[in-house]
Image (cartoon, helix red, strand yellow):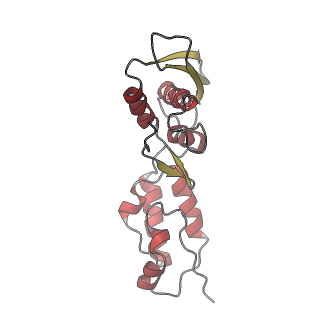
Amino acid sequence: MNKKLPTIQIKGKEYVMVKDRVIEFNERCPEGSIITEIVKNDDKSVVVKATVYPDSKNQEKRFVGHSEAYREGNMGDVPVEVAETSAVGRALGMMGIGVLEGIASADEIKKATGTGKPASDKQKNMILSLAKEKGFDITEEQVAGLSTVQASQKITKLMGMKSPEKSNSQIKAEDAVTMDIGYEDIPVVDSE
């Protein structure tokens, strides 16, 4: 029985979070197990191997996934946990759980693209300030869930925009879809 698992969108594609893959695995395979082991752990990175057994009594049928997390960058102080989560997600993907467009999970894509680290207050305030200056009605709630990468992209986009000649209410009405959070593309309104 393949039920639809919850997804999140990253860069226009849907991905299933590892937590949802694990929940599905435990429902499908109550006699199964997930085993992780650290394959490499040095001052540069951590590599974790995850092995998924749908039936713990049958060790021949298994699915394996690996993941590496670097100590520098967006892993913070938890590279072991990040690598382990991604490895588990990949192993469950090999089993077919949560596979939509590929094996990667949302967690893995976030790790790879740096979208997992939350935007700083300084970035959020800059977005709000630039949006107000440019005539866009963006709320604190809309910027609350942005990552550092997403915030940087929004700031760059806003800094390069001309101030609109339309009123805020016109822009808001015309661009309600794109201004909604996902808000991947802040509308560009060229003044003539």
Q: Position of residue 44 (x, y in %)?
A: 62, 24
173 displayed left or right of 47: left
Q: Residue, x 47% and y 60% (percent of image)? A: 182
Q: Residue, x 47% and y 79% (percent of image)? A: 135
> In what quadrant of the picture does the N terminus appear?
top left
Q: Nearer the viewer, residue 112 or 174?
A: 174
Q: Is residue 142 above or below residue 111?
A: below
- For the question of whether residue 123 can be seen, the reply is yes
Q: Is residue 134 above or below residue 181?
A: below
Q: Residue furthest front?
A: 1
Q: Is residue 176 above or below residue 154?
A: below
- The number of numbered badges drawn on the structure is 0
Q: Position of residue 149 (x, y in %)?
A: 55, 51
Q: Position of residue 83 (x, y in %)?
A: 53, 27
Q: Quadrant of residue 64?
A: top right
- For the question of whether residue 48 can be seen, the reply is no
Q: Nearer the viewer, residue 171 or 118?
A: 171
> In what quadrant of the picture does the C terminus appear?
bottom right
Q: Residue furthest bottom?
A: 192
Q: Nearer the viewer, residue 31 or 119?
A: 31
Q: Position of residue 131 (x, y in %)?
A: 47, 71
Q: Nearer the viewer, residue 3 or 158?
A: 3
